[in-house]
Amino acid sequence: MDLEKLENKINIKFKDKDLLKSALTHRSYLNENRKWPLPHNERLEFLGDAVLELITTEYLYRNYPNPEGELTNFRSALVNYKMLSDVANSLGLEEHILLSKGESKDIGRARQVILANALEALIGAIYLDSGFETSKTFITANIIGKLQSIVEEGEVLDPKSKFQELAQEKLGVTPHYIVLGEWGPDHNKNFEVGVFINQKQIAKGVGPSKQEAEVAAAKNGLEISDF
């Protein structure tokens, strides 16, 4: 674990190096390394998530006069796990995270979630070690700075929000989602969800969580223009 390399990358020097190490320690690592003296990063992730939400919310409030619903969409586009995992990758965080041998082989969504959680844990560690203003500088430079391109590329609204707006505009109703089926072991579940308008199923989608299956269903629903 080359802490100095990471500190140079994020331009922050930690007074308490153990905070940084803990932020990079995944729960699975402790299962294989019982003598590791530090806790895993989930408590720091919990704190970092709150710090991230506060700082992004304050920024949006001060800089955008949009209604509350639009500000919520802006924030969601900034702090979802896919965006955070991209930021973590850009910082080279992956090479520093301590994982079990099994977890280190994860790819796709599972790896993205690990990276996103580690970034939030890092934010929590920065907050404890250096305070609010340093956390704000880090978040502004690495996360909030991506907002303009998100807005310009029309990626603010997720498929569920877009589908809901379309349904309300055309039919004056709000779509709802129903789980049609699920399968697989607990650690590798798959869900099939249908999106309905009134009693009519418009489309369905599959994903590794109910939420992602709903997004897939909405995305498929958007491709149907005659509902």
Image (cartoon, rainbow, N blue to C red):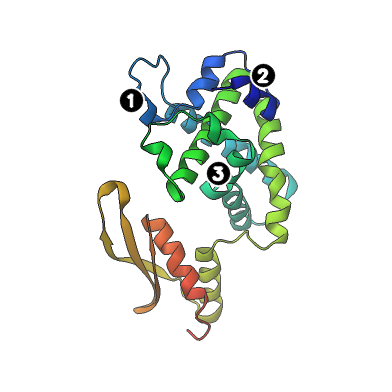
CA gap between label 1 and label 3 equals 25 Å
Residue labelled with disc 3 = 85
Q: Can you give x and y, in whole percent of width and height, for residue 218 in the image?
A: 47, 69
Q: Residue furthest bottom?
A: 226
Name the residue: 41% across, 57% down: 211
User: Which residue corresponds to the image point at 37% horizontal and 55% vertical from the top-left?
Assistant: 208
Q: 56 left or right of 170?
A: right
- Residue 98 is tagged as none
Whether residue 130 is visible, yes or no, is yes
Residue that carries the numbered disc 2 in the rendered image: 13
Looking at the image, how many numbered discs can be counted on the residues? 3
**In the displayed structure, would residue 101 be above or below residue 184?**
above
Crowd around label 1: few <14 · some 14–19 · many ≥20 (10 Å)? few
Separation of residues labelled 1 and 2 (CA atoms): 29 Å
Disc 1: which residue: 32
Q: Position of residue 26 (x, y in %)?
A: 42, 30
For label 2, the SS is: loop
Residues under labels 2 and 3: Cα distance? 22 Å
- Nearest to the observer: residue 101 or residue 210: 101
Disc with the residue nearer the chain's start (2 vs 3): 2
Label 1 SS: helix
User: How would you rate the neighbour count of disc 2 (Cα within 10 Å): few for under 14, some for 14-19, many for 20 or more?
Assistant: some
Residue 157's x, y, as percent?
59, 61
Evaluate whether residue 133 shows in this view.
no
Residue type at the position of mark 1: Glu
| Image point (34%, 78%), residue name | 199
